Each structure stands twice: as C-alpha cells, then as structure tokens.
Image: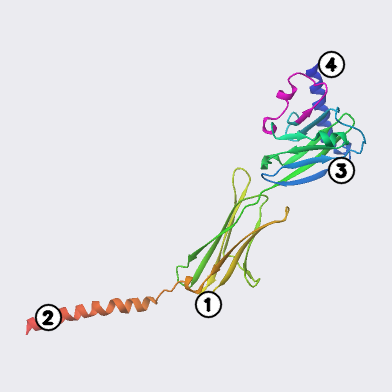
Amino acid sequence: MASAPLKQRLFRVLLLLLSLFPTLLHGQLLTTTALVGEDVTLSYDPELSTDLTETAVKCYTDKMLNDFVFYKDKPPLSPLDSESLLNPAYRGRTNLSAEDLKRGIISLRLYNVTRADEGNYTFVLPSLIYKIQLLIGAVSSATITPEERHDCSGLVLRCDSVGWYPRPQLSWWTDGGRLLPAVTMNPTRDPTGLYTISSTVEVESSQGAGNYSCRVHQERFNQTREAEIAIQEDQFPSCSSPYLWFAVLAIPIGASVLVVIAKKIIQIF
C-alpha cells in the first residue's frame, strides 16, 4: 500500500493534469461574485441525490496545488493534513454546510472575502471534480470638494473615490441630467490592486447656482456610488478687475508724488 506522502504526491499530480485539461472537469465552470468584506457561498449540486456527510471533500485554489482552502477527509491522509495542507489565509474563514451535505449539495462558506480570494476553486470528491470561479469586487464612496478658479471665473469641483476593483468609470452631471465634460481624469492603482479615481470639472459663474453630481460606476458588479453638491450664487468668486485695483492704488501714490513735486517747486522759488 502506498505511503501517505506518496498518496499526497499522486493526488497533486492528478490535480495538475485536471487543471491542464479542464474538459475532464464535471460540467461547466461556475461563477460566483462577491464584494470585499462580504461572506460568500461557493455552492454546487452534483445531483447525486445522496447524503454526502461522510464523503471526503477537498477544495484548493489554482494558485498552488497544495493551497487547500478546505479539507474534509475520512480517514485523513496523515495526522498532520489539516495543519500542513490548509492555507493559513483560510483558517477560521471557511465552513462546509452540514445541512446541505445531507441533501447532497456542496456549500462552502467563505467569510470576509478580500481581493486575494479572487480565483478558481476546485472541489474534489471521490466521484467527481468541479470548479467554481470567484470574482471579487470592491466599491467605495465618493466626495466632492469645491475650489475657486484662479481667474475668478467660476469654481473647480474635484471628485475623489478610493478603493475600487475592477477599475470604475467616473462622470459628472447637472441636476438636469446633462453630462459635463471632465477637465482631468486620473485613475491610479495601489499595491493591493485597488483603484483610486479622481476628476475635476469647471463650473462657470455664468452657469449659476445648481446641483452637480459625481457618479462612479463599476460595470462588472453593476455598482454605482454618487456624490452631490449644491452650489449657491454666493459661492462663486467675486473678484474685482485688476485695472480697478491699479486705479485705486495709483490715486494715492500719484497724489503723494504731486505733493513732493509741489514742495520742491516752492523751495526753488
């Protein structure tokens, strides 16, 4: 009889072959989606119509052949299987539904998902192997900050939203449903893979008071977050003409010069 380490090696070779030839997997690739921080259930009904409570169930990711998410086997391949095979990132975050097992359904609950949890999860039972693709999204709120334009002709509205995945789209709108052209659009990505997007739009004083909104949308997960700001007439900058300021300053300076000149003339005569 093959030793436990040999069984493990043979099992991993089998998984590798099945990953290279996906047509050997049972059925089509299933897809499940979740947002960062949510709990998600990776569920599959093999339609065996039998109690799977005592059935060996293994779940691993495509990242590593021994990257086990969940390991339920009777009897275990070795006394250290649960510690040596289970990825530490999943410890305490998974639960296999005993109630569903009795009905012949595999339902693995994954808690508080992160961006790193995205990928393919392969479930291995004695009679079949199937795969579920988990897609992870992240959404965030948006904020609008108003600033005065340097030329005093209106306002610059800046919208910022931090922590999206996949990359979202940003657009500006008036309360009348008119799309505004953005002046700047700057998406960036942090080391964890999350996107930050910021944009500015200019509102001329001639446009007057009104509500302006920044809309951030992520298409894959159909998620939208919106921020709105109400601009009043008195918020627009009121800058006087530079020529007027020149005149205001020039009058006292000119008067002082004339006084000095007059004194010089008096002294001469």
Q: Nearer the viewer, residue 94 or 148?
A: 94
Give the residue number, with chain letter if any, for mark 4.
Answer: 2
* Among numbered discs 3 and 1, the one appearing first in the sequence: 3
- State if disc 1 and disc 3 touch (CB < 8 Å): no
Q: What is the distance, in whole Å, between disc 4 and disc 2 at their CAs?
A: 118 Å
Above or below for 264 versus 47: below
Q: Secondary structure at mark 3?
A: loop
* Among numbered discs 4 and 2, the one appearing first in the sequence: 4
- State if disc 4 and disc 3 touch (CB < 8 Å): no
Q: Nearer the viewer, mark 4 or mark 2?
A: 4
Q: Disc number at residue 28? A: 3
What residue occupies the far top of the structure in this picture? 1
Tell whether 118 sits left or right of 49. Answer: left
Q: Where is residue 18 shown, x and y percent of the image?
A: 84, 33
Give the residue number, with chain letter if any, for mark 1.
Answer: 206
Picture quarter containing residue 16?
top right
Tell whether 246 sits left or right of 59. Answer: left
* Among numbered discs 2 and 3, the one appearing first in the sequence: 3
Above or below for 43 versus 229: above
Q: Amino acid at mark 2?
A: Lys
Q: Where is residue 68 shown, x and y percent of the image?
A: 74, 30
Q: Which residues are magenta?
A: 70-90
Q: Disc number at residue 263? A: 2
